[in-house]
Amino acid sequence: MKKLLALRELSTVAILILEVLFFTWWLWPETARPHPFLNSGNALLILKYSSIYGIAAIGAAIVIISGGIDLAPGAVMALAGVIGADLFVTQGWGLGPAMVCGVLVGVAAGLLSAALVVLVRLPPFIATLGVMGITRGAAFIITEGQYFDVSSRLLGGWRPLGLPADWAAPIVLLVLALVFQILMTTFQWGRAVFSIGGNETAALFSGIAVGRIKTSVYALSGLLAGVSGVVLVLVQGQGKADLATGYELDIIASAVVGGASLSGGRGSVIGAVLGTLIFGVLRNALPQIPGATFYDRLIVGLVVIVIVVMDQLLLKRPRT
Amino acid sequence: MQKRSVANFTIVALAAGMIVAGCGSKGPQSQTTTRFRFAVIPKALDIPVFNYAKIGAERKAKELGNVDILWNAPTSADQLKQKEILESYITQRVDGIAISSLNGDFLTDTINRAVDAGIPVVTWDSDAPKSKRVAFYGVDDLASGRIMGEQAVKLLNGQGKVAIITSVGATNLQRRLDGARDVLAKAPGIKIVEIFDIKEDSVRCAELIATGTNRYPDLGAWLSVGGWPVFTRNATAPIDSSKTKVISFDTIQPALDLLREGKVHVLLGQKYFGWGSEPVQILYDIKHGKNPASPVIDSGVDVVTKDTVDQYEATWKKMESGS
């Protein structure tokens, strides 16, 4: 199993490398000017924006591995960001406490999803669809169509731990990816998540506290969406109710492209992060090709299908 | 027996409902003046500039005295949801509708249906020119786009590369884009390197500005037909303002501060408060038998530069406070 996962992650890395090589070749400058795609500034840009999706995709991957689905991350990101921004901009809170509150709102949203799935026994699709509506609606109620201008309160630059602000999001992603990869692969909790996703009844009979594990999975997904939301607000400089609209599908797609099986029991945190990087490179490189800006949705859709089909053919695994 | 009790219950419930409805309708009838219910529909509730239209509409309603404003729109830009809201106001038989069309052609039939049903419709901000709407109040988008193009040519002394930011789908943005492209195409030294579609996503806008700046280090100007780049300081942060000029629509903060700091060079301000107040006044006049002299009322556009920003902001604050 471990070998298979390693192989799957390796194939995701291979796709990412092929993608980078393709755009490096396609966008090769005709004159002696610097390469527009293959440069450190652009790499940091890809990492910065991919991190917004990537942090939430870690949570999405864990939920999918457990056999569930979470449709709420985009809306939770917006609500967490809006609350953090509101406390920071209008209530005059410090940046740290305000953003921690935003993250806690994400946890609360995750716990609500968990309660609906575990206690009320709603299908995860319906439960998280409801939470998506509730959290997006709450964000709109708070903002009333306006936005909180975080950028004006962060004048003079924001340097987390003395580092340039652009590095913050990729560092948060890297740390969280490592923590959750270790949690999922070496801790009993992670193995329990895989077991529940593989066969919930068998997991129950083998003594796994299925309800408690599922609750922790949705709470962590909410926490990660909350972190992603506050990172988004800091990157974007504004808290707005419509931020991250539709991101849930990109987040789920990243996890799936990274090897997560929608039938549960398979996937990885690192794979999900690699999946967001595949989309991040596409988002960055396609607009650099004249005229391609109107085609990017189509190309992203095709890429999802091609990668998942290739995955099935290469590994000869059952369909996700 | 059970069927009979259900029938009895239904009759009693209907009778009670009619009595309640009757009591409810007695209030307004007993008043000496008729109260008008005007539906005011912006493109979406999450677009900050429309809040000023709401202030304008509500202030005008208060001034007129016997007007109630029904403010509603899709939470984010969604043509079908906007059409549904418009249809609901037709069935509710409101006294007038003022709408900023997300897609004028898509709404034409529905607007015609409202007018045929005796509900006057005024479009604002974004028109539905093929419909039977009584009037349109807003900027001439084609002319505004031309102004943006002219400002770009002027700032670049007729030489340089220009990247344009838009969001595909809205009629008014398309017309602004057409106007800007029209002027830029006539300047032989100007080259449009790319037209970026940000899909109404402000995060995507910031990402594309960063990517585009990286892709075209010798870019002369960014030209945005919507206000996305100036609604936050972070979006324009990657731009080297000594090399690249920024011309954008909309003037709400922090746009004016960015202009003062030299990060942005020209802003085009619309009559945000007028979007709400003028259509309400037009509908009110129609209800009193007075149609507008012209079906298209050009609100004009404010071209704001570093030299005029203080004066513009003073006027803005005056309008915001209602003094």
Image (cartoon, rainbow, N blue to C red):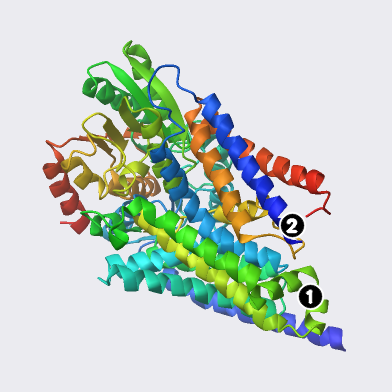
Q: N-terminal of the two: label 1 or label 2?
A: 2
The quarter holding residue A243 reads bottom left
Instruction: Kindly give the residue lying farthest to the front in the view shown.
Output: A3
Amino acid type shown at disc 1:
Glu
Amino acid type shown at disc 2:
Lys
Residue at image x 71%, y 51%?
A8
Above or below residue B68? Residue A25 is above
Q: Is residue A219 left or right of residue A78?
A: right
Camera-nearest label, 1 or 2 = 2
The percent position of residue B172, horizontal first and vertical second, equals 43, 34
Camera sees residue B201: no
Residue at image x 27%, y 16%?
B159
Residue at image x 53%, y 49%?
B82
Above or below residue B69? Residue B245 is above
Label 1: chain? A
Secondary element at tag 1: helix
The percent position of residue B93, horizontal first and vertical second, equals 53, 56
Q: Which residue is mark 2?
A: A3
Label 2: chain? A
Secondary element at tag 2: helix
Residue at image x 57%, y 61%?
A58
The quarter holding residue B239 reads top left
Q: Residues within 10 Å of mark 2 (few under 14, many from 20)?
A: few
Q: Which residue is mark 1?
A: A200
Quarter of the image that includes the N terminus of chain A: bottom right
